[in-house]
């Protein structure tokens, strides 16, 4: 199930709200949330509820085991990490691995493609943060299976993050403020996120599909509009989803970390990655980069660590070599900023960074390297269709309003507007949020096009 | 007392209070929609979209396992959403106001009409169809054959398309098609006649439907009469529907400022004929079905819609039998032809499961007319099958 669907907005959510606020006591509320989370998770592939239950139970007991047998703590940790990565690897990377082996060795091992359990990349990372931090002694193991299950499977951020570390929500699992005030603010945040997804991401996504998906030839204009449309689509899709998750969490009494802070306004690539998908960056930093040694131990080791982290970050985004390349592409720019161009020039830096990011999304959204080459050379002025083509001109006008709206909402004032609205002008906030709900509903009722980009991760 | 009330009101309207109010209001709103959804009886058919709506999915273990149940439940929730029609109108109203000019392959033209797009056509399919026609004509050299390929709105009103609208050149398609078949089949090119009608300010097409008007089909018929060497009937026009909203509205969701009206060629009371659907062996004494005017597709007033094979026997008594291999563009034109033939056989290859040759064994076909619109023919995979089948 996805948030931006009629069935979620008008069946799942009201029923969940009703029961959640009706039942007394935090334990019963947790049970309700867990049940709804499992229903949400199993919606697309019911059999995977078993996978989720297995994942919860195994990791719960591994956590307890660390406390029962402190001297075998390390062995338990290694096993737990191995187990979780194995499950992730089997479902997400098995086909990719076999295909890569076949490609390298010329073998023809059979490839079995399993449907990807939704959110597996996200909840596996959450589970690992629990296990690793538990090993590090940051907190005690969760004693309640219900609370632990809720932490792993909570439907707000199950599908597309933010990746919540256990110690961020540990207290809230057993004690949190549940109030109408939080409900109102959380729902307002949720509706703003819904608008980002339904009224911008989906529409510029249509434009990207028309101009790029399935096309083999491009004009310079068409390739640029396609790239810009995707740049907007992925930001509004992903940050809209994160806003919805944070908003729902808030409504139900949880505080999740912020995942995006106007990333396209960054003046360097380093800054971009501090403002884009913050919870993923934090995760890799805490559980991979620093354990590898970080920037201690000389330049050679530092470069090695950066390359490892970014190859993995790329691979996390999808089981394909284009994603690995995309990760390494960023590693190169991060290293250049670290060792070569250390000076930050405000406006020029912003423009160069944005250009690097847009080209990065071309890598990210292409199916193979040949497509990357064709699209980039068209953007550089060597398109097979010349500088412009009628389809690009037509659809540019067709979607102009949504493109402009998207661009405007990436500007600094939009960020100030959002926080200003949420904190100061609450009547206006409420009215805008309701308007977004009505219009989004109208678009969702009609929309057959509604896939979440981050579903395959 | 009143002071107490005031402070209560103040509390509600305070910043914290406003969120409280908003949270409760939105929750109640969502629950109210849910309740309305459950209380309002489900609809079977959507008039606005002209399609059957998804019903409550049946619970089954297999459906659950395969994921069909849940995807059907999602469709059900969207299809039976209370106020779905209003929501769709709102969506299209906003989109159109903000500049949308294409929806599901339908253009909103500059003159406030709707036109189906004409995409670049499949050349292999075109060749296959042309070869099938040539071979068919070769097998029946004693029977004269004619081909009327009518342009659709996009071919005749190209200048009304939105700027830069991607589309293929329909006139080039028609020209190329005629050129390939003209040695064996006589082209009946109606484009000049329709152009003249357009110039005179008359409606050639319904603004909301992909068909041509009966007025236009009469002009085409006059050209055809010349080719068939029959004396053209007079146009006894009568308007049977003033509130026609055609298929392109349903397909695109666009809202148009005006209604269309449907005209028919009134039957001559002195002239009798019978219409028989061979598949079901039903007979009728008219080619008009007025009850269809209130149905989901009022254009079905002509012959009740499309059927595999329809035989019309008249009192013309001239031993002439015309076989018309056609799509729905023919339906409003055929009534003009009735008085010139003793028998007319209408075959719609999209629904006809047998070969065209077999008809020559049972019918004494004296002429063959192919009547298609360019958009249908360019994408049609049934004509060559029917002609090749032996």
Image: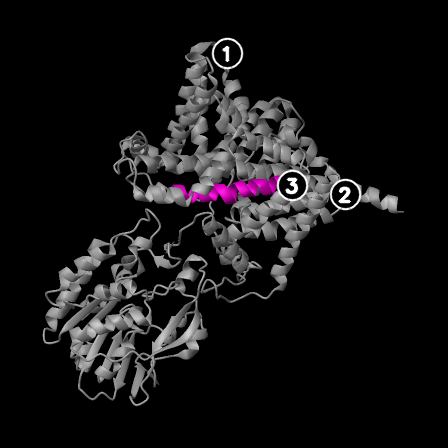
Inspect this view and state whether residue A150 appears. Answer: no
Report in which chain the residue with disc 2 lies: B
Q: Which residue is mark 3?
A: A428
Which residues fall within the magenta stretch? Answer: A185-208
Q: Mark 2 or mark 1: which is in front?
A: 2
Circles 3 and 2 on the same subunit: no
- Residue A296: assigned label: 1
Q: Mark 1 or mark 3: which is in front?
A: 3
Chief secondary structure of the magenta portion: helix
Distance of label 2 from label 1 (alpha carbons): 56 Å
The single residue placed furthest to the bottom in the displayed view is B270
Q: Quadrant of the C terminus of chain B?
A: bottom left
Q: Which residue is mark 2?
A: B12
Labels 1 and 3 touching (C-beta < 8 A):
no
Looking at the rendered structure, the secondary structure element under dot 3 is helix
Report in which chain the residue with disc 3 lies: A
């Amino acid at each position: 199930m996805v948030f931006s669907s009629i069935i979620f907005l008008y069946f799942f959510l009201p029923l969940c709200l009703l029961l959640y606020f009706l039942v007394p006591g935090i334990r019963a509320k947790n049970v309700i949330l867990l049940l709804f989370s499992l229903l949400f998770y199993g919606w697309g592939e019911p059999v995977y509820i078993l996978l989720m239950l297995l994942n919860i139970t195994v990791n719960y007991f591994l956590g307890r085991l660390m406390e029962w047998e402190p001297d075998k703590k390390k062995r338990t940790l290694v096993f737990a990490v191995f187990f979780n990565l194995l499950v992730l690897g089997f479902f997400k990377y098995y086909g990719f691995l076999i295909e890569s082996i076949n490609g390298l060795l010329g073998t023809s091992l059979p490839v079995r493609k399993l449907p990807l359990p939704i959110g597996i990349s996200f909840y596996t990372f959450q589970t690992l943060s629990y296990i690793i931090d538990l090993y590090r002694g940051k907190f005690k193991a969760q004693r309640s299976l219900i609370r632990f299950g809720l932490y792993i499977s909570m439907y707000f951020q199950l599908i597309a993050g933010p990746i919540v570390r256990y110690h961020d929500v540990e207290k809230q699992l057993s004690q949190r403020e549940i109030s109408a005030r939080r409900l109102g603010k959380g729902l307002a945040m949720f509706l703003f996120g819904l608008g980002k997804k339904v009224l911008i991401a989906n529409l510029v996504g249509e434009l990207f599909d028309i101009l790029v998906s399935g096309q083999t030839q491009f004009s310079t204009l068409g390739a640029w509009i396609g790239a810009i449309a995707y740049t907007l689509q992925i930001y509004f899709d992903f940050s809209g989803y994160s806003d919805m998750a944070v908003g729902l969490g808030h409504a139900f009494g949880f505080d999740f970390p912020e995942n995006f802070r106007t990333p396209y306004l960054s003046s360097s690539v380093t800054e971009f990655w501090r403002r884009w998908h913050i919870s993923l960056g934090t995760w890799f930093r805490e559980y991979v980069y620093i354990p590898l040694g970080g920037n201690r131990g000389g330049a050679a080791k530092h470069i090695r660590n950066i390359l490892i982290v970014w190859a993995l970050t790329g691979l996390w985004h999808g089981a394909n070599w284009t994603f690995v390349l995309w990760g390494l592409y960023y590693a190169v720019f991060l290293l250049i900023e670290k060792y070569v161009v250390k000076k930050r020039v405000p406006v020029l830096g912003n423009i160069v960074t944005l250009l690097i990011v847009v080209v990065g999304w071309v890598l990210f959204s292409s199916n193979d390297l040949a497509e990357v080459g064709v699209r980039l050379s068209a953007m550089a002025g060597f398109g097979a269709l010349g500088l412009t083509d009628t389809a690009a001109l037509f659809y540019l006008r067709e979607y102009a309003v949504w493109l402009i709206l998207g661009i405007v909402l990436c500007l600094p004032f939009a960020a100030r507007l959002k926080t200003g609205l949420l904190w100061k002008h609450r009547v206006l906030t409420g009215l805008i949020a309701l308007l977004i709900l009505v219009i989004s509903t109208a678009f969702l009722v009609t929309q057959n096009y509604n896939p979440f980009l981050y579903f395959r991760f | 007392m009143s002071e107490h009330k005031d402070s209560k009101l103040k509390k509600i309207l305070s910043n914290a209070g406003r969120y409280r109010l908003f949270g409760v209001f939105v929750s109640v709103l969502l629950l109210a929609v849910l309740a309305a959804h459950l209380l309002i009886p489900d609809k079977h058919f959507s008039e606005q979209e002209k399609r059957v709506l998804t019903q409550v999915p049946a619970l089954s273990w297999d459906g659950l396992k395969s994921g069909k149940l849940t995807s059907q439940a999602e469709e059900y929730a969207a299809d039976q959403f209370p106020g779905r029609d209003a929501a769709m109108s709102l969506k299209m109203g906003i989109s159109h106001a903000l500049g949308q000019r294409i929806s599901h392959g339908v253009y909103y033209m500059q003159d406030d009409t709707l036109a189906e797009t004409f995409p670049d056509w499949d050349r292999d399919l075109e060749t296959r169809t042309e070869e099938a026609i040539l071979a068919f004509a070769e097998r029946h050299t004693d029977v004269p054959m004619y081909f009327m390929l009518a342009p659709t709105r996009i071919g005749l009103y190209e200048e009304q398309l939105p700027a830069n609208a991607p589309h293929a050149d329909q006139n080039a398609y028609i020209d190329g098609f005629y050129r390939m078949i003209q040695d064996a089949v006589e082209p009946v090119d109606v484009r000049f006649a329709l152009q003249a009608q357009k110039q005179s300010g008359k409606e050639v097409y319904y603004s909301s439907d992909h068909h041509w008007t009966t007025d236009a089909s009469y002009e085409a018929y006059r050209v055809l009469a010349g080719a068939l060497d029959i004396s053209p009937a007079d146009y006894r026009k009568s308007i049977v529907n003033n509130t026609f909203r055609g298929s392109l509205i349903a397909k695109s969701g666009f809202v148009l400022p005006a209604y269309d009206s449907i005209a028919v060629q009134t039957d001559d009371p002195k002239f009798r004929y019978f219409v028989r659907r061979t598949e079901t062996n039903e007979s009728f004494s008219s080619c008009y079905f007025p009850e269809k005017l209130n149905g989901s597709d009022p254009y079905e007033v002509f012959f009740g819609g499309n059927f595999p094979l329809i035989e019309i026997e008249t009192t013309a008594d001239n031993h002439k039998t015309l076989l018309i291999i056609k799509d729905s563009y023919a339906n409003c034109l055929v009534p003009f032809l009735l008085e010139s033939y003793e028998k007319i056989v209408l075959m719609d290859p999209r629904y006809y499961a047998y070969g065209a040759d077999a008809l020559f064994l049972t019918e004494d076909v004296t002429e063959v007319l192919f009547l298609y619109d360019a958009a249908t023919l360019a994408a049609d995979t049934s004509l060559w099958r029917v002609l090749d089948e032996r």
